[in-house]
Image: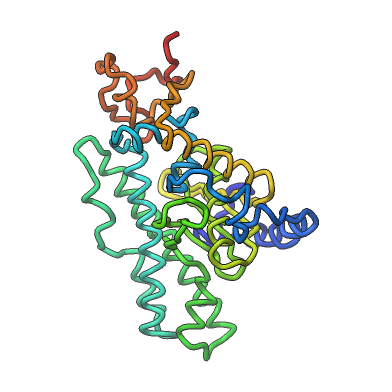
Amino acid sequence: MGDRQEGLVYFPSGDELRWVQRGLLPDARRQPVADELRGWNWERPPLKPVYDQPLGVYEIAGKYCPTGRDVYLRRVTGVQGPPNVGMREGRVLHGVVADVLTQAKRLIYMHGAASLPFLDELSSSSRDDGAALVEPTFELDQLSAKVRTLRRFEARRIVERVEGVLARQPHVQPDALALLALPVGVEVKLDGRFLGLSEHLAADAVSLPDMGVLDLKFGPREAFHRLTTTGYALVLESLYERPVDLGCVVYARFVQSRMVIERDYHVIGDELRQWFIEERDEKARLVAEEIDPGLPGVCPRTCPYLRTCYPTERDLAEPHRIVGVANLPQKASEATVTVPS
């Protein structure tokens, strides 16, 4: 999609919207999803859970540990890996996006068409954006700069969207104004029990007009990121019994003092659904049968379980100060740890 920056984080640019409406969605209609892979058929195979081990979507979709040993350690041995720098930063930035959108909707409901001056102030909000998560090794100045950039980016575009709706519908009521300008729900709580998942799931965002699932990432792109949108699409189908065919992984990064947004729109078809179900069943099996899958051939340096998996190499596992890069000392070109044979 390129680096187009029109629209908010969760809203497509004009070119992207045309691509979705004239490209992806027609393709999805020509190749419909097999009925047995729709979430509303949760009581029949292959969707019917094999094991009674409710996992989170992030545990199934997050294939950062290739063997799934992170799930085994967390669920079977009770080891909680400390969040790495990138995880802590991502938590703060996710909170900023959700907070700005939630505040904007609240202001629209309070002031209606007169909300524009209040919305203008969102970019300079002095609200606490996660300072409590910051630790001594955290690059606080860099994080604060990213928070300010992200708030400005979102706030300016919220004002533009509200202005656009008011220009077309000057007598619109507050509820309709919020729906037309910001048709997305953030941090949407979902019950995944029909699919053998946790009953306390939270999707980053759901686009309300088309029930599309959106997931926000502040790190590098991975093929398995589409499993997250797939998991939530299946859950939404199981709960509301209507098709959810569209997903989008939003990749946000910071270049100096500006945002660069890339959106990976994709059809949630048979292949992704089968992949998610296979991952669900395999990781649930590891937990139910208490199977240690062992170390992968290569371990990401950002894995929060490095200290657990390499207890005899603690000198290599001291926290690193390079933000979002590593928990281990590394050369500039290294991003993984190779397991000794």
- Count the labels in the image: 0
**What is the quadrant of residue 107 in the picture?**
bottom left
Q: Residue at x 48, y 42 (%)?
A: 60
The answer to whether one can see residue 186 in this image is yes
Residue at point 41%, 78% (across, down): 116
> Dividing the image into 4 quarters, which one contains the C terminus?
top left
Task: Say if 130 sits above or below 189 in the image.
Answer: above
Viewer-proximal residue, 2 or 215? 215
Q: What residue is shown at x 46% (from left), y 20% (from top)?
A: 333
Residue 57 higher or lower than 222, as above or below? below
Farthest residue, direction right = 30
The coloring applied to the image is rainbow
Q: Outermost residue toward the left?
A: 136
Q: Position of residue 146 (x, y in %)?
A: 36, 49
Question: Is residue 249 shown to the viewer in this render?
Answer: no
Seen as rendered, the residue at the extreme bottom is: 171
The residue drawn where x is 46% and y is 51% is: 197
x, y percentage for residue 214? 53, 56
Q: Position of residue 149 (x, y in %)?
A: 38, 53
**Occupied quadrant, residue 289:** top left
Locate residue 279, reporting x and y percent: 54, 39
Q: Is residue 288 left or right of residue 38?
A: left
Height in image: 87 above or below 334? Answer: below
Frontmost residue, 57 versus 139? 57
